Image (cartoon, helix red, strand yellow):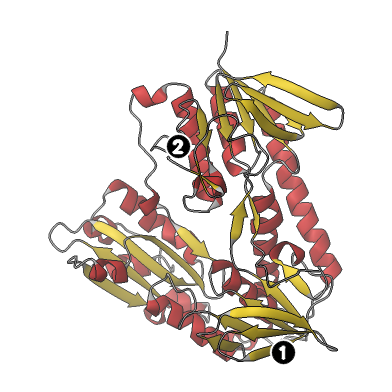
């Protein structure tokens, strides 16, 4: 009899765990209430990046004079953008469903909950279905965090999920939150021609990132006409005759036609039977996960946003794979544990921002000796050819061994270029391994070899 593996939540973690375990011979049931591929992924990540891509193309058209082109005015067709996003998400969900079905995964549309530590109940339109399981994975995702001083209405006061795209393009949007999601919204709306005010609770945007990285982005925002309220924390939103006003704790008030809440997310762990199954919790997050992502109940696993680890689709996907391997016993042979400190991440602003591994500021804070090399894209032939020399490549390495410990890239295609450094960090490569590689010329990637010398 095959091992019975039941997964609640068909996001990146759930779909990857399902396909991986099925290929290894498990009898897999995947329960998903909304969209296969995950709400956070296909209702947040993909639509936001699609809108950013549209805005970026608009910027490219408007800035083409530097390429020797004469261009006419371009404008945004919001309905066409909406239809494009729907086509992308529909195609991705169809791909996910086809892949799962081809692997023999039983797909159940419904809401899953644990009845006990070996029993899962799915509530569907046709009634309740009960499944006995040898192993269970919970990956139910998250939803936008709404503070008690805000009441989103989907009209003037928006959550992130109200904004892909919004009903109308705001004349002046106030973005509350200067983390990754917030700065992406600033870029997206400003690219579409909206006036933007950003409420920044600290003294720099992206407070957890390298100050040099944040400085490049802030400079771009100011050039776009974005107004920054630094050191201000939003504490209230009021409707006005022309839109909304946002009150800050330092007494300042931002006036706009719309506002967007981009202040984090809350795990979807209520009402799914975790307590009934004996799973330990830390507030809304699952607690006491080991490096196999097992809860305190050895055969129950947690992945994705509810795990309290890095809230990235890429990380969730790898978590799903690692869980499937552990469920099927592959950890007893060669098995590399997931190292969150070596996960690459990107921010899809313009310029793009990407990093991996040890950050320069963290190294100095720890008193750790590192070698820092930095090369601006202004010295790159390809960047000059593309008429976009903004940003830089920075590599952090061990001065004694030359092992690459981390790096940051700010500039065009940073999310693609960071893959080289991610491979280097994950596999303990040295700067000489990059410097002695022969890359294409002219290419932006040449900045990596220059920084590695």
Q: Position of residue 92 (x, y in %)?
A: 71, 46
| Mark 1 residue crowding within 10 angstroms, few (<14) / some (14–19) / many (20+) | many
Quadrant hosting residue 94: top right
| Mark 2 residue crowding within 10 angstroms, few (<14) / some (14–19) / many (20+) | many
Q: Position of residue 395 (x, y in %)?
A: 30, 66
Q: Which mark is residue 293?
A: 2
Q: Position of residue 214 (x, y in %)?
A: 45, 78
Q: Position of residue 157 (x, y in %)?
A: 76, 73
Looking at the image, tell me whether mark 2 or mark 1 is earlier in sequence order.
1
Against 221, residue 132 (above or below) is: above
Q: Which SS class for mark 1?
A: strand
- Image position of 209 (left or right of 316): left
Quadrant placement of the C terminus: bottom left
Against 452, residue 21 (above or below) is: above
Residue carrying label 1:
255
Question: Residue at 56% of width from left, 72% of height from top?
Answer: 349
Evaluate whether residue 301 shows in this view: yes
């Amino acid at each position: 009899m095959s091992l019975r593996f039941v997964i609640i939540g068909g996001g990146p973690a759930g779909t990857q765990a399902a396909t991986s375990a099925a290929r290894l011979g498990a009898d897999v049931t995947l329960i998903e209430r909304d969209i296969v591929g995950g709400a956070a992924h296909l209702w947040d990540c993909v639509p936001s990046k699609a809108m950013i891509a549209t805005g970026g193309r608009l910027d490219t058209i408007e800035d083409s004079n530097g390429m020797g082109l004469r261009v006419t005015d371009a404008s945004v067709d919001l309905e066409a953008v909406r239809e494009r996003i729907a086509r992308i998400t529909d195609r991705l969900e169809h791909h996910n469903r086809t892949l799962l079905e081809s692997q023999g995964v039983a797909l159940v549309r419904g809401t899953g909950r644990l009845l006990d530590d070996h029993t899962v109940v799915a509530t569907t339109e046709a009634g309740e279905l009960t499944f006995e399981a040898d192993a269970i994975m919970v990956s139910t995702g998250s939803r936008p965090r709404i503070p008690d001083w805000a009441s989103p209405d989907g009209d003037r006061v928006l959550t992130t999920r109200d904004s892909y795209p919004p009903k109308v393009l705001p004349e002046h949007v106030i973005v509350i939150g200067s983390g990754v999601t917030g700065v992406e919204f600033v870029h997206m709306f400003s690219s579409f021609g909206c006036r933007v005010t950003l409420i920044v609770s600290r003294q720099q945007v992206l407070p957890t990132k390298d100050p040099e990285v944040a400085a490049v982005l802030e400079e771009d925002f100011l050039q776009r006409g974005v107004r920054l309220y630094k050191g201000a924390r939003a504490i209230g939103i009021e409707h006005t005759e022309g839109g909304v006003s946002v009150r800050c704790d330092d007494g300042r008030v931002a006036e706009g036609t719309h506002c967007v809440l981009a202040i984090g997310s809350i795990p979807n762990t209520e009402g799914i039977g975790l307590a009934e199954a004996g799973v330990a919790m830390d507030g809304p997050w699952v607690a006491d996960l080991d490096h196999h992502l097992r809860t305190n109940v050895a055969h129950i696993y947690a992945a994705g946003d509810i795990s309290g680890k890095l809230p990235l689709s890429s990380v969730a996907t790898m978590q799903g794979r690692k869980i499937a391997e552990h469920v099927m016993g592959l950890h007893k042979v060669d098995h590399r544990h997931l190292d969150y400190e070596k996960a690459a991440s990107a921010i899809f602003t313009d310029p793009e921002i990407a990093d991996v591994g040890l950050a320069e500021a963290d190294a100095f804070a720890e008193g750790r000796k590192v070698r820092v090399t930095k090369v601006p894209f202004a010295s790159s032939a390809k960047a000059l050819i593309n008429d976009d020399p903004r940003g830089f490549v920075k590599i952090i390495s061990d001065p004694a061994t030359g092992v690459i410990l981390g790096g940051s890239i700010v500039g065009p295609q940073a999310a693609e270029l960071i893959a080289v450094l991610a491979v280097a960090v994950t596999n303990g490569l040295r700067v000489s391994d990059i410097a002695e590689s022969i890359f294409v010329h002219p290419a932006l990637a040449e900045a990596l070899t220059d920084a590695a010398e």
